[in-house]
Image (tube, grey):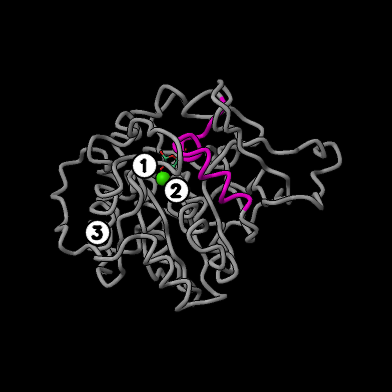
Amino acid sequence: RQPVLVDCDTGIDDAVALLYLLSVPSIEIVGITTVSGNAPARACAINTLTVLALAGRTDIPVAVGAERPFLAEPRPHSVHVHGYDGMGDAGLPPADPALLDPRSALQLIDDLSCAHAGRLRILATGAFTNLALAVRADPTLVGRIADVVVMGGAAEVPGNMTPAAEANIAHDPEGAAVVLSAGWPIAMVPLDVTTTELLTEEHVERLTASGEVGRFVAAISDYYMNFYAPFFGRRVAVQHDALAAGILAGDVVPTVFPLLRVEVECGPGPARGATVCDTRGRHLGYPDDPDGNCRVALRTPGGFVDLLVDRLAAMG
Ligand code: BDR
Ligand code: CA
């Protein structure tokens, strides 16, 4: 099984991504680190423990990571999207913090990268602060990682946290710049594709009629669907992070997935946090750029949420 470290800000769609990944037979989640974003990093870690307890996987270490960006001042947490507790304020009893791994996120990343040197894959579904700090602390980390898949950015569409910036990048543009240029094989799953994978009311009905996992996903999605309703004209839960997990796992194969030059705008102006992707080759079908630093999922086949709901429903 492929060892995967998940770095996340759990988070409603992060929670769904984790549950999905736990259902993939070829993947073994070997550790989870959390970062400030949807909620404080410590709250995200507690939420992660709740998800793991639900899945019966409290054996997976969860370490708290950065509460502040790599360089910048923090932005407010995304209470309007994910609730005060980061899990849609669904009234879930918080998990026991004593179950957190005593190591720092950086220590856990280092330990796992040594234990699985050359094989460890990373899925990042929050701001990239922990990964940026880890690379800066020890540049040899890059050589021990097989590949990195990140949910983040907006290639040819507007941002969501600002007109230019997607939330995971907006929370820490400088950290994102470090991670995207670190030299490891990295793939970005931007809003261009994640906003096409929508969990609908019909999916929620199916989940509610399934088992405990399905009911949990239905409960935490309620708040999130209210947030998205005005943007889509109906209540939907956008599966940003689960789509990135689906691409990492190979359940989703992007149909347009070029290697591109991607840079992050780190200036103070209105474009701060934009992922500037060189898509000038679009008329030629987006050829790979020999100077590219990041593969970018620009189109996906669609239909992943149906598979996702099947998997969640089957978890019992
Ligand atoms: C990303 O931001 C967070 O709100 C979500 O969990 C996702 O990772 C989408 O922009
Ligand atoms: Ca997230």
The magenta region covers 164-181
Q: Amino acid at mark 2?
A: Thr
Q: Which residue is mark 1?
A: 68
Question: Residue 263 placed where, x, y %?
Answer: 65, 40
Quote the CA–CA distance across marks 3 and 2. 21 Å
Q: What residue appears at the point 60 percent right and 69 percent down from the top-left corner?
A: 143
The answer to whether residue 305 is above or below residue 79 is below
Q: Is residue 261 magenta?
A: no
Q: CA distance from mark 1 to mark 3?
A: 21 Å
Counting residues from the start of the chain, the first of labels 2 and 1 encountered is 1
Answer few, some or many: residues within 10 Å of disc 2's Cα (few below 14, many 20 plus, some between 14 and 19).
many
Query: Which type of secondary structure does the marked residue at label 3 adopt?
Result: helix
Q: Is label 2 in a helix, a strand or a loop?
A: helix
First of labels 1, 3 by sequence position: 3
90 shown above or below 100: above
Query: Residue beneath label 3, please?
Result: 49
Q: Quadrant of ligand 1?
A: top left
Measured along the vertical axis of the image, is residue 146 above or below residue 284? Answer: below
- Disc 3 Cβ-to-ligand 2 distance below 8 Å: no
* 288 is higher (above) or lower (below) than 4: above
Amino acid identity at mark 1: Arg
Q: Which residue does the image show at 29% across and 34% down from the upper left?
A: 223
Q: Which residue is mark 2?
A: 129
User: In which quarter of the view is residue 48 placed?
Assistant: bottom left
